[in-house]
Image (cartoon, grey):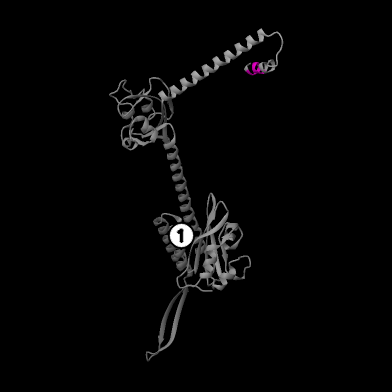
Amino acid sequence: TPFWNDLYLSPVRNDMGRVVQLVAVMQDVTEREQMARRLATEAAIIRALAESPSIYEAAPRILQAIGEAQEWDMGTFWRLESRSQTLHCVDLWHPADLPLDAFTKFVREATFSRDMGVPGQVWSEGEPVWLPELVKDNRFPEGALAAEAGLVSACGFPIASRRGLQGVLVFYSRRIWPLSKNLVLLMVGTSTQISQYMEREKVEIEQKELTILERGLAEFMGEGLVAMDRDGYCIYVNAAAGRMLGHRPKTLLGQNLHEILHPLASPPPCEPGVCPILLSLQSTKSSHVDDPSAVFFNHDRAAVPVAYTTSPIIDRDLIQGVVITFVDARARRAQEELMRRLLQEKDEEIKRIRETLTQSQGSRKEPSPSDAVLDNIRKLLG
């Protein structure tokens, strides 16, 4: 079994000054060397994660850092595909002078399910796996190709978070290294660092997708939508709001939103204790205003009758701003008036049909073939 040796040699000379013996003092410093290498490897992994925009960019640097420091001959990074529930190799590393073409081709094309291959074994057990004699274990389909490449041992460890398994790291060697405490600590520490990075990366992607979705919905919704920060300055305007107010949305950003919607020079002036927009910066409750006197002012300082809702933006129990959604009340009221007129016309039409049916029933003494039809119409009309 190889070990790290701290060796001191000293010659023993005779009276003539000739070297007649050697005294050697050696000390097993494997633990000290492994600890130093582990700390250096962890530092290299942290740098790789900090300097890389994604886990795919960091993966080759992480594999190289672990492989070179721990003297492994090949490292592979496997990621779990949630839909197919299989592991796929997203990157690998090995020294440039080591001919592993056949084995690397197999690894890049392989797909492992749970319990299949070294990655699948790590997935199944959910903890580090140490395989000192990979070539003698028939459970692993990659064993034969690994043996042809001269790789005789392997180790793997999971990358997992509270959401479950995210990936697996597997390393191969042409020598059989003893499993040490420092190697286990390196496995656990690396797994924690990478899983935290992947978790943050996934959350950032989800938030970015949600932001894109929210902005897309906000841009295509029929209602006007504006938002201001807690100081009253505009931070967002959708296309519908710009259209109704007669402003280009970008020109409103950074301006005092209340002064645009309720300019003080336009009667009636807003009072801080009365205006729903200003009150929303003081209260955590939403408010809805649907009053004939409610107006916003457009680019030409002309009053636009509106119905609007104010919703405070709250973070850590503090109001960070307000979102205001509004509609042009003129268009809505015109539509409501049209609906009332249509309903009134329908009521009048039903009344005329009833009168016709009543007159027809009173003028006939004998039943006719259409009486059954008229009876059914009366039933439908109540």
Numbered range of the magenta stretch: 376-380
Q: List x then y, in percent, for residue 18.
A: 39, 90
Left or right placement of residue 114 versus residue 267 in this view? right
Q: Hey, what amino acid is under mark 1?
A: Ala
Q: Is residue 313 above or below residue 129?
A: above
Q: Is residue 243 above or below residue 173?
A: above
Q: Is residue 163 above or below residue 97?
A: above
Q: Is residue 322 visible?
A: no
Q: Nearer the viewer, residue 69 or 281?
A: 281
Q: Residue furthest right?
A: 366
Q: Point out the image quarter for the C terminus.
A: top right
- Specify whether residue 372 is in view: yes
Q: Quadrant of the N terminus?
A: bottom right
Is 16 contained in the magenta span?
no
x 61%, y 12%: residue: 356
Comparing 263 with 305, the one in front is: 305
Main secondary structure along the magenta-highlighted residues: helix
Identify the residue position indicated by label 1 in the image: 59
Q: Which residue sits at x=54%, y=60%?
A: 157
Q: In the rendered image, which quarter is residue 8 located in?
A: bottom left
